[in-house]
Amino acid sequence: MDFLKLLRDEIRGGLRRTPEAYRAKHAAWLHAQQTDGGGFANRRGVGELYYTTFGLRALSCLEALAPESAAKALFFLRAETAKKRHSFRDAISAVSWWDAVALCAEAGGGELSESERAEAQRRTAESLAALRRSDGGWAKTSIEGNGSLYHSFLACCAFGRAGMPPPEAKGITTFLASVRQDGGGFRENTYSKRPGTNGTAAGVALALMLKAQAMPGLLAKIASWPALAKAAIPLAAQDLAPHAEFLKTMRGEEGGLHATASAPIADLLSTFTGCFTLRTLGALDEALLTRAQTYARAMECGGGGYMGFALEQDPDCEYTFYGLGVMSLG
């Protein structure tokens, strides 16, 4: 299933409730991050695939991705596939490329030809197969011998965006069970000692995706993430219920959520993924959300864009997406 589309639709719907001036400010800032080559700028001002995808996602959530911008981005994405370190070399690159291509097409910026799509699907399957490990997960890199929960989640998202079913779903289920903590939370891999916010968010989402894929009749009825959660959570309540309580322990004094219990400060990524997952599990209370949104506002820049955490000084496309995501939950 296409989790990233469902996620985008959820954030988009929430942002429609925010003031028009707020949306326009951040849309203008995001458009300014697109370089002449079509990509969106990284921290060095250079167009990069990772930041391009977040720029496009954020603009799509704001319903402000113009056909002209999408066409420029698609030109950049096509050029990325020809590089030595190509767009399909790992789960992050693959999901970034496929999501960006889909967003460009939706915005009227052009589409891949049938031959381009087939070749991209082949290269995606081939590269990700090389990263599949015996524990059932996908590794971060070719030199790592064990699966990563975050990268396994992204690999499944990449397959969904590419219109391909993830291979050997039973192995993914086995891997997910191996990193689940009985008391709540998911570890990043089988060697990690403690669970974290973002790994738990990925684990919950992946569990729901697998539950839906195992029941074709359920999957056929899913039109939104809340609909999937409403239908699938009762079927997995015993496994998923403890994760909400774990996520609540990650709240920081600043109002945001911490990535791990040992993290010194909160960050915007963990705040969004934690709050979104709590809402999915029906456990996002008003007080927690209010504090999280207050924290997000403190990370917002006056001229548009969001910073990732309190010690940063510059916004970027990735954290702007997370900031918009937090504000969409109200």
Image (cartoon, helix red, strand yellow):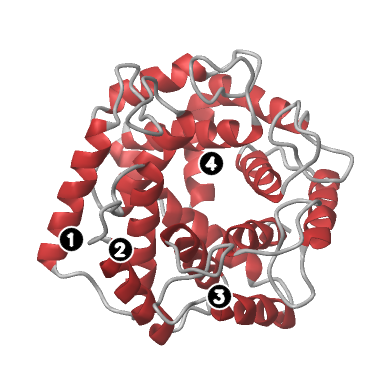
Most foreground residue, 140 or 230 = 140
Q: Which of the two discs, 1 and 2, sits closer to the camera?
A: 2
Circle 2 packing at 10 Å, graded few (<14), some (14-19), many (20+), is: some
**Mark 3 Cα shell of 10 Å, populated few (<14), some (14-19), many (≥20):** many
Of the residues tagged 2 and 4, which is closer to the observer? Answer: 2
Residue 323 vertical placement versus 283 (above, below): below
Mark 1 element type: helix
Q: Give the labeled residue for mark 2.
A: 80
Amino acid type at circle 1 is: Arg
Point out which mark residue 151 bears.
none
The alpha-carbon separation of the residues under discs 3 and 2 comes to: 18 Å
Q: CA distance from mark 4 to mark 3?
A: 37 Å
Q: Position of residue 322 (x, y in %)?
A: 63, 56
Q: What residue did someone put label 3 on?
A: 33
User: How far apart are labels 1 and 3 at the CA level?
Assistant: 27 Å
Dot 3 amino acid type: Gln
User: Residue at 64% across / 29% down in the picture?
Assistant: 196
For the image, the number of numbered tags is 4
Few, some or many residues within 10 Å of mark 1 (<14, 14–19, 20+): some
Q: Mark 2 to mark 4: distance in Å?
A: 39 Å
Can residue 220 be seen at all in this image of the molecule?
Answer: no
Helix or strand or loop: what does disc 2 sit on?
helix
Sooner in the amino-acid sequence: mark 4 or mark 3: 3
Reading the image, the residue beneath label 4 is 230
Q: Give the residue at x 53% y 29%.
A: 234
Q: Nearer the viewer, mark 1 or mark 3?
A: 3
Per the rendering, the mark at residue 117 is 1
Q: Give the residue type at disc 2.
A: Glu
Compared to residue 254, the image places residue 175 above or below, namely above
